[in-house]
């Protein structure tokens, strides 16, 4: 099968953009972040032994989709004609897609994430990301709190105040889901977040984790059965954003989730 057929079979996506989970009008940096998020979820190193072969296949398909869309000339041809040059340099069969991925994205440690969090919180970029998430999810605080980087349930009052000030200033629309949110939903979100935070801390203590890359990998693996998707989503966003900043000398860019 060709690449487009592979995308359909592996991800149920009608095109390369759908396979990466990004809109057709996305900027090169948005496509890069989308590729990073999607590829982390199927990375062979994170798969269970029995699922590694399928994960490798899906990982390779995503790499090929990104290779096409990250090349301005090939993307233009694809956008205009809807075809992919299967024999071109970008899709050559002998390419090591894991090495290609590693060249794009630096490895990070727990300390990297902690350092990034210190600089990110209360920054202009966090403000922009909160506003963007509010609009994307039409005021749904469950999804806003899941989407914005580096926040936990203790940050919710601060996040709510940021949104309320922006609404009062006319910078954001007043969505009913936000202004009329029930106390019951707020309480349920807090309890869920507290439970997840407790479980994560217990796992860290059980494993005696520190700040190294191996500790980060151990934490991911320890949560594979019950919180794999949540942890992968978090790391995907953090690695995409942190890695991107490192390559640009610290310049911060938004890591948004689109509407589902």
Image: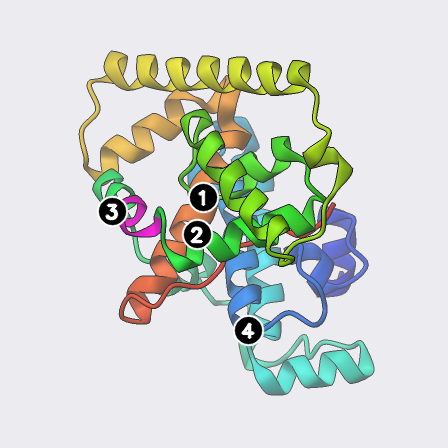
Magenta-drawn stretch contains 63: no
The image quadrant where one finds the C terminus is: top right
Q: Are marks 1 and 2 in contact (CB under 8 Å)?
A: yes
Q: Position of residue 243 (x, y in %)?
A: 35, 58
The part of the chain drawn in magenta is 116-120
**Visible in this render: residue 123?**
yes
Report how far apart the C-alphas of labels 1 and 2 lie in the structure. Answer: 8 Å
Instruction: Check the image and tell me how it is coloured.
Output: rainbow
Would you identify the image quadrant in which residue 180 lies? top right
Report how far apart the C-alphas of labels 1 and 3 lie in the structure. Answer: 14 Å
Q: Label 1, on which residue?
A: 149
Q: Label 3, on which residue?
A: 112
Between discs 3 and 2, the one toward the N terminus: 3
In the image, residue 252 above or below residue 88:
above
The image quadrant where one finds the N terminus is: bottom right
| Closer-to-camera residue (228/160) | 160
Mark 4 residue crowding within 10 angstroms, few (<14) / some (14–19) / many (20+): some
Between discs 4 and 1, the one toward the N terminus: 4
Q: Label 2, on which residue?
A: 126
Q: Position of residue 171 (x, y in %)?
A: 62, 58
Between discs 1 and 2, the one toward the N terminus: 2
Q: Position of residue 7 (x, y in %)?
A: 72, 56
Between discs 2 and 4, the one toward the N terminus: 4
What's the mark number on residue 28? Answer: 4
């Amino acid at each position: 099968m060709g690449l487009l057929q592979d995308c359909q079979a592996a991800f149920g996506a009608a095109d390369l953009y759908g396979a990466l989970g990004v809109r057709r009008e996305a900027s090169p940096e948005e496509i890069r972040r989308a590729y990073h998020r999607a590829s982390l979820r199927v990375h062979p190193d994170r798969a269970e032994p029995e699922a590694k072969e399928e994960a490798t296949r899906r990982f390779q398909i995503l790499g090929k989709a990104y290779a096409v869309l990250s090349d301005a000339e090939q993307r233009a041809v694809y956008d205009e004609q809807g075809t992919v040059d299967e024999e071109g340099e970008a899709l050559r069969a002998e390419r090591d897609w894991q090495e290609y991925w590693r060249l794009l994205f630096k490895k990070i440690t727990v300390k990297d994430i902690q350092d990034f969090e210190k600089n990110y919180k209360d920054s202009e970029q966090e403000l922009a990301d909160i506003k963007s998430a509010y609009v994307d999810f039409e005021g749904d605080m469950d999804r806003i709190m899941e989407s914005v980087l580096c926040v936990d349930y203790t940050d919710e009052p601060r996040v709510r105040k940021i949104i309320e000030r922006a609404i009062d200033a006319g910078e954001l629309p007043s969505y009913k889901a936000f202004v009329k949110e029930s106390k019951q939903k707020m309480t349920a979100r807090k309890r869920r977040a507290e439970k997840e935070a407790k479980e994560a801390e217990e796992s860290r203590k059980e494993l005696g984790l520190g700040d190294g890359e191996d500790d980060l990998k151990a934490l991911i693996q320890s949560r594979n059965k019950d919180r794999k998707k949540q942890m992968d989503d978090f790391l995907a966003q953090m690695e995409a954003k942190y890695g991107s900043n490192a390559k640009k000398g610290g310049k911060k860019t938004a890591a948004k989730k689109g509407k589902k």
